[in-house]
Image (cartoon, grey):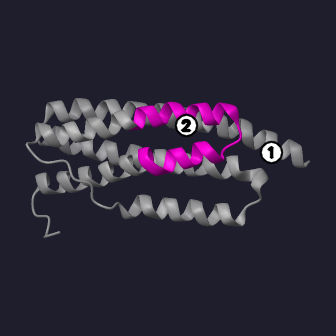
Amino acid sequence: MSEITTPRELFLHELSDILYVERKLADETLPKLISEVRDDEFKAALEDHLDQTRGHVTNVEQVFGELGEEASAEKCLGFEGLKAEHDKLLEETSSDLIDSVDLGAAARTENYEIAAYEGLRRMAKALGEDKAVDLLDANLAQEKEALRLVEKIATRVSNESVKATA
């Protein structure tokens, strides 16, 4: 990519990053997690969030459209780092702790997405892109709710895991 020189170019770059993240989550990451977790509540939450994530992709693509741009996803190194960390930890961890590993990865990813959407929302507002703000706000609200649920489930699973090994 050429040098980013304007706020709009930076916004489009960041929007491309989050589109990459949402597509990867919808197409690969969430289905993989759903297949490996054992906890029923966590599995159901992941399935619900997969449906939401597909909507996030649509919303981000609509933001591109609102800007008169073609939706494009650019590889997001931050997300790839989170994914690599998860995969390495999964290899090193007992199968009894898969849910705990996946809950940690889910929480880190939700926090990453929340930070991305907050930044995108700020930039869209500064650029006067009100429709983009609305679409980004919708995604942001769902990501915050997903994080709240992941944290709730993680607390329960952690407590159960410790009791089982005590």
Residue 44 painted magenta: yes
Identify the residue at image location x=58%, y=59%.
86
Q: Which residues are magenta?
A: 25-53
User: Mark 2 or 1 closer to N-term?
Assistant: 2
The CA distance from mark 2 to mark 1 is 20 Å
The answer to if 48 sits in the magenta stretch is yes
Q: Is 42 on the left-hand or right-hand side of 142?
A: right
Residue 160: image x %, image y %? Answer: 80, 39
75 horizontally vs 98: left or right: left
The residue wearing badge 2 is 46
Farthest bottom residue?
2
Q: Which mark is residue 161?
A: 1
Q: Tell which residue pokes out farthest to the right in this image.
A: 166
- Residue 25, position as x, y percentages in the image: 44, 47
Which SS type dominates the magenta stretch? helix
Q: Amino acid at mark 1?
A: Ser
Q: Under tag 2, what secondary structure? A: helix
